[in-house]
Image: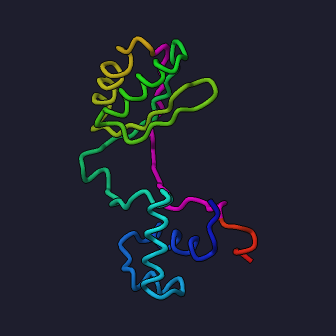
Amino acid sequence: MMMDRIDDAILDALQNNGRISNKELAAAVGLAPSSCFERVRRLQERGVLRGFRADVEPESLGVGLQAFVSVRLAQHSRDLVASFRDHVVSLPEVVGVYHVAGQEDFVVHVAVRDAAHLRNLTLDAFTTRAEVARLNTALVYEHIPKSRWPNYAVSEESSV
């Protein structure tokens, strides 16, 4: 699925400000508002734009600690991997799940109130699972999210 420089400019503008009006977006990328609206609609239909979200300050929600919990599974069948993945995705403290290659099988980003909450979460929601062989927890000192993805789908010809 190739994108041209206009699609790239639309994505860049929306990743910078998801609340930009269609009129402002059209002016920023050099299109008529109707053409811009149609481009955004096509990006949504193709699954390139998956949604629009609010960027929330975690501490305002009572999140006092974030951590990455690295998990090694005891076995690696599709059913066990899917079962563990579905379990952690269902936990309210989980803000991201990464199924990875290497020493660990999953890296789970959690947001909790404090160290006691983290301890209880790992003991109750992770170590009680039969498919879990080992855990390693790394505390997050600072989280600086990036809202932009690099775009490698722009064709060479359209970016010149």
The answer to if 148 sits in the magenta stretch is yes
Q: What x and y, as percent, mark residue 20?
A: 38, 77
Vertical side of 7 occupied by 126: above or below: above
Q: At x 48% / y 82%, what residue is drawn?
A: 35
Q: Nearer the viewer, residue 21 or 98?
A: 21
Q: What x and y, as percent, mark residue 31?
A: 51, 86
Vertical side of 145 occupied by 21: above or below: below
* Left-right relation of 1 to 41: right
Q: Quadrant of the N terminus?
A: bottom right
Q: Which residues are magenta?
A: 132-153
Vertical side of 80 occupied by 147: above or below: below
Quarter-of-image position of residue 125:
top left
* Left-right relation of 54 to 159: left
Q: At x 56% / y 75%, what residue is drawn?
A: 9
Q: At x 39% / y 69%, what residue is drawn?
A: 18
Q: At x 43% / y 28%, what residue is drawn?
A: 85
The answer to if 108 sits in the magenta stretch is no
Q: What x and y, as percent, mark residue 130?
A: 40, 11
